[in-house]
Amino acid sequence: MSLSYEDVIAKYEPVLGLEVHVELNTNSKMFCGCATAFGAEPNTQTCPVCLGMPGALPVVNEKAIESSILIGLALHCSVTPFSRFSRKNYFYPDMPKNFQISQYDEPICVNGYVDVEIETEEGPKKFRIEIERVHMEEDTGKSLHMGGATGRIHGADYSLLDFNRAGIPLVEIVTKIVPGTGKYAPEVAKAYVAELRDILRSLGVSDVRMEQGSLRCDANVSLRLIGAETLGTRSETKNVNSLRSVERAVRGEMIRHAELLEKGQRVVQETRHFQEDSGLTRSGRSKEQAEDYRYFPEPDLVPVEPDAAWIEKLRASLPEQPTLRRKRLQAEWSVPEKEMAAMINADALDIVETTVKLGADPAKARSWWLGEISRIANERDIALPELPITAKDVAAIVALVSQGQLTDKLARQVVEGVINGEGTPEHVIQARGLKVVSDESALMVAIEKAIEAQPETAEKVRNGHIPAAGALIGAVMKETKGQADAARVRELLLSHLGQ
Amino acid sequence: MITRSAHEMANALESGEITSEKLTQDHLDRIAAVDGEVHAFLYVDTEGALSQARAVDAARAKGEKVGPLAGVPLALKDVMVQKGVPTTAGSKILEGWRPPYDATVVTKLKSAGIVILGKTNMDEFAMGSSTENSAYGPTHNPWDLTRIPGGSGGGSSAALAAFEAPLAIGTDTGGSIRQPAAVTGTVGVKPTYGGVSRYGLIAFSSSLDQAGPCARTVLDTALLHEAIAGHDPKDATSIDAPVPQVVKAAREGDVKGMKIGVVKELNGDGYQTGVRSRFEESLELLAKAGAEIVEVSCPNFEYALAAYYLIAPSECSSNLARFDAMRYGMRVGDDNGASAEIVMNLTREVGFGREVKRRIILGTYALSSGYYDAYYGSAQKVRTLIMQDFTNAFSSADVLVSPTCPTTAFKIGEKADDPLAMYLNDIATIPVNMAGIGGMSLPCGLAPEDGLPVGFQVMSPAMQDQRMYSVGAALEAALLSQWGAPLLSQIPALAGAK
C-alpha cells in the first residue's frame, strides 16, 4: 500500500518530539584538557581521562557550564540552582569508561520554549515549541567499521576506534511533546531546528555544522487518529544531518507509520536511521525493551551550583534574539519578505549586516552578496561565508563604486580578484589596472573618435533623437575597455552634441 | 638501620650517616631476603628506586633544599598508577599494563624525593579484608605467616611490619588502611575524604575511596600525610583548603583537656576479649595523659555495614566497566572472528576474580531500575543518618575512639568461603568512610590470648585530621614508656632474615 501525504494528514495527527545534540565549541573537552578541533588525526586528541584509563578522574569544564546556561537562557528556560551529573551505564567499545557522564534527573536548565514561524497558504503561522530540558553530557568516540559492504558493524571485518571525539562537550536540548502541528509537522520540525541553529550561532557556543555533526537532530514521530487522546507508538530517527533531512525524515516517518497502521500492523518502538539518498529510514536498535542504564549520581563530580549573580550576568550578555533581529534588520533595510528569506537561506544575514555596519548601503551590500558573490559561491559549491572575501572587502568595493572610481563591471572583476586570492580590492585594482578612466580629456578623445566613426548616429542625436546616443556611448566604453563611468560619458557626449 | 623509623632515617640521611642509595639498597636486600615468606610486593622496581635514590643523594650533595622525607624508601599499594611501572590493582585483568601517567600522590612522592621501592600486594581492586583476594596469591602476616595481614592493603602493612619499607601508601574504602595496620601492629591513617587526591587511584568505590599514609610510628605517618595531602585540580572532590597541621600535632601529642568519646556501639559483643582489654587500658593511659573520656552513642552504625555493601558494589559495578579488553590490559578470545562483545565477556570472565564478580553483580542489581530506590537510594539515606550520628557525637567529644577491628588477625583460609564473616571484620572502620571523616589505627599491644597485635582507632571530624594525630601520638608515647621498646621489637624473626 502506498499512501500520499494528503491521505495521511486527512486521518492522522502527527506528534513530534525533537532531541537536538549540540557540540559546544569550547577549546577543551568536557572533563579534561584535550583539544577539540574537528578532523584531527585519529586518537591524537586524547589523554588518560578521555580514554577512561584506570585511576583517571573527570573535572568539569567551566566554559561548558557557561555555554549551557547561555543556551538555557536563550531558550527561555529556568536555570536550576542545583544540578548534577549522573552515570549512564552501558557497554560499547567506543565508550572508554563504558558509562557516559550525562545529566539525568537534575539537568542544568528546564522549561523553556522556542517560537517558530512558517509560511503557509493562509499566510505566516506561528508555533510554540516547548522545551523540557537542556542538559550537558560528554560525546562518545567514533567506531569505523572496516570491510563489508555497508560500513555497518554487521558484516564488517574489523572496527577501528577513534577517541578524539570522546569527551567533547555536548548539550542536549529536548522538547516536550509537540502536538497540534497537523500537516505542517515536517515544516515545523525543520523551522525549529533552523531557529535553534540560529540561536546557538548567535550565542557563539557551537559551530552548529549539521554536516560535521556539531548539530544533530533525533526526530521522534508518532501518529494518532485525529481527535484521539492517547499517543501512538513513536519511532526515533537518528542521523538526520541537514535541515532538509529533518523535514524529509518527519514526512517519511509519518507516511511509513500510516501505512503500517492502515495495514492493521503496529509501529515498532525503535531507533531508525535516516538514509540521505533515499529519504527513507531503516530500522536500528529496538527500544521495545527499555535498556536499563542504571543511572546514579556521578560520585567523581560535585554538583553544579551556579551563582545567581553569574546567571544574571550571563542573561544580560545575551545577544539579540535571531527572530527579533531579522525583523529589525528587515525594517531598517526595508527589504521585501522574499528577499529577506533569500538572505537567510543563503546564510548571508550576518555578513550583509557587517558590510552595512562598515558603511555600505544596505541595498548595495545585499545585491553584491546575494548576486555576484552568491553566484561564485554556487559555482564553486562553497557556503557563502566560507568564500575568501570579507565584509570589509565588499564595503570597500561598494564605496569605490559610489565614488565613481569603479563601474559595476569593473567592480565584478575586483570581486573575482579578491576571491581568487589576489589581495585586497586596492591590490586587485592596482594589479589589474582597473581604475575608471575619469580623465575627461581622454574621454573626449574617445567620444570624438566614436562620433567620427558613426557620423550619422551623431547627427540623429544632434537632431534631438536622444536614444541613438546609446550606440555612441557603447563605442566609447569599448574604446576605454569598460573603465569609464558610463553616466559621465553620456553627460559629456550629449553636451558635446548640443543636447 | 632498616628497623628505625622513617623520621630517624631522614635524620641519618641529613647528617650524612648514610646515603639514600645505601638505605634503598638495604631495603631492596631485605625484600630479597624475606619477601619470599611475606609476599608483600607484586613488583620491585630495583632500578627505578636506586636511580631515584641517587638523584636525592646528588641533590643533597649539591646543597639543594630537599623535603623532610627525601631519600627515605616507600612501598606503594598497587592500586596507585605509576608511569611505566606495572600496575595491576591485584587483578589479572590488568596484568602487564604499564600506566602512561603518574597518580597525583606519586607525583607528590617523587617531588618530595621519597624513593618508591615497588608495588604492594592487595585484594583485587581493593575488595577484601585479608589480601586473599589478590589474583597473585595472599600476603602473609609477619607476626604469624599462617595468618592474614589484613586487607585490602595487606601488602603495604606487611612490608612495614617486615621492615621491607619504613613508609607505605594505602587506600581505604571501608578500612583497607586501618584494619591491615591493626593486625600487623603498624600505623595507618585514612585522611578526611578529599584530603588526598584520588587522581590515579584505580577506583573501587569513588565516594568512599581515600588514599592515605602508613608507617610504623605516628610521626612518620604524619610526615607522609603532609607529603601527599592537599588540593588537586585534577580531582573534583579534592578539598581546596589548607592541609591540617598533622606533623605539629604528632610532635606535640597533647591531649590535655581533650574530650575523647568512646563509641558504645563499637565495642562489647562480638569483640575479642584481648582486643577489649587492650582498648580499655589505652583509654586509661589517655585519661592519665589529661584527656577526658566520655561515652557517645551512634545508633545508626548498626546499618552501616549493610548500606556499605550496597553503595560500594554499586559504584564498583560502574567503575570496573572500563575493563573491557578494548584499550589496555588482558584480552581473551580475540581470534579475529569473535565480536567485541564476546571478547569483552570472555576477558571479564577470566580476568576478574570471584569476589570482584560477586560485587559487580550485587551492584548491578542494586542500581537496576525498580530496585534503585529500595537499595542504592535507601543506602544513601543510611549514609546521611550515619553522618548525623557523627555530628551529634562530635558535639560532645573532640575525637571518637574504638577498637579498629573486632578481632586480631585470623588464619589464612579461615573466612575465605564466608564473605559475610569477612565483611564483619570491617564493622568498626566502615562508618568513617560513609561519613567521609578521618580515621587512624595505631597499635595498642598484643592480645594476651594469641599474642597478636591489637589496633586502636581514633576518628576525627572532617578536616580536623590533626586531632587524631594528637591522640595517636599521646597514646603511642604512653605505651612506649610502658613497654620500653616499640611493639614491633617483639615480632618474631623471619627465616630469611638470617
Image (cartoon, rainbow, N blue to C red):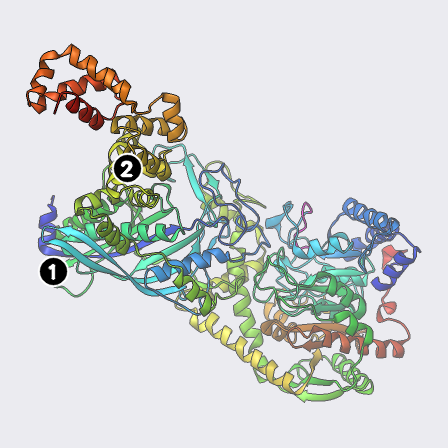
Q: Amino acid at mark 1?
A: Ile
Which residue, as the protein is rendered here, is positioned at the far top? A453
Do we see residue B159 in this rendering?
yes
Q: Secondary structure at mark 2?
A: helix
Q: Give the side of residue A271 with respect to residue B218, left or right.
A: left
Q: Amino acid at mark 2?
A: Trp
Q: CA distance from mark 1 to mark 2?
A: 46 Å
Viewer-side residue, B413 vs B481: B481
Magenta-drawn stretch, dominant element (helix, strand or loop): loop
Which residue occupies 16% across, 52% down? A184
Q: Give the side of residue A237 with respect to residue A462, left or right.
A: right
Residue A172's spot in the image, x, y percent? 37, 56
Residue under numbered circle 2? A369
Q: Which corner quadrant holds the C terminus of chain A?
A: top left
Which residue occupies 36% across, 62% down? A73
Residue A452's spot in the image, x, y percent? 16, 11
The magenta segment: B78-85
The correct choice, above or below, for B478 with respect to A253 in the image is below
Q: Is residue B497 magenta?
A: no
Q: Quadrant of residue B352?
A: bottom right
The correct choice, above or below, for A190 with respect to A428 in the image is below
Which residue, as the protein is rendered here, is positioned at the far right? B17
Residue under numbered circle 1? A226
Q: Which corner quadrant holds the N terminus of chain A?
A: top left
